Amino acid sequence: MSRAGDSGFPTVGEVRGFQEAIELLYGDRDRARGIDGTFVWFVEEVGELARALKGDDPGNLIEEFADVYAWLSTLASLAGVDMAEAVGKYARGCPRCHQAPCACPPKRSQRTPEQGLT
């Protein structure tokens, strides 16, 4: 979501607006289901995304990413978390090195064989 002259990071209003839209659409059902039941649905959607990532249907992949984002927003609402505030952690670059793109050395578990595992 890149716009001329900015970092391409979604605005607070865009993130908050999406979370509020999901609350309007599904808030009553989500509150009735509760955070535990909603978390189960979220995990199921993550599983569907995992299967879509292994597939070859770009439309399904887009759909599953949307579903995961919507369910994550629902969980945040139920937990009293403002997603705009949460994603703000990354608004000024990497939270560790404060660079964009990140300039941190890869963690051991993120290194490729070519980079060495020591």
Image (cartoon, grey):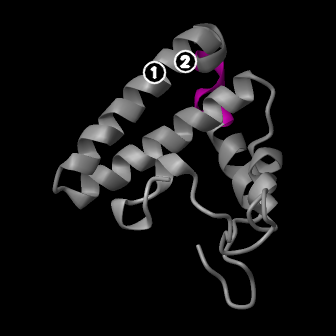
Specify whether 81 is left or right of 74: right
Question: Which residue is pictured at 76% across the width and 72% down the height?
Answer: 99
Closer to us: 104 or 115: 115
Q: Amino acid at mark 1?
A: Trp
In the depicted structure, whether residue 53 falls above or below residue 90 = above
- Which quadrant would residue 80 be assigned to in this image? top right
Q: Is residue 10 above or below residue 78?
A: below
Residue visible at 26% across and 45% down?
52
Q: Are marks 1 and 2 in contact (CB under 8 Å)?
A: yes
> In the displayed structure, does residue 48 sit left or right of residue 101?
left
Q: Which residue is mark 2?
A: 38
Q: Quadrant of residue 115?
A: bottom left
Secondary structure category for the residue under label 2: helix
Residue that mark 1 sits on = 41
Q: Residue furthest front?
A: 118
Report the disc number at residue 7.
none
Classified by dominant secondary structure, the portion drawn in magenta counts as helix
- Identify which amino acid the numbered label 2 is placed on: Thr
Where residue 30 sits in the image (x, y, percent)?
Answer: 60, 19
Label 2: few (<14), some (14–19) or many (≥20) C-alpha neighbours in 10 Å: many
Query: Which residues are drawn in magenta?
Result: 23-29
Seen in the picture, residue 59 relative to 37 is either above or below; the reply is below
Residue in view at x 83 percent, y 47 percent: 85
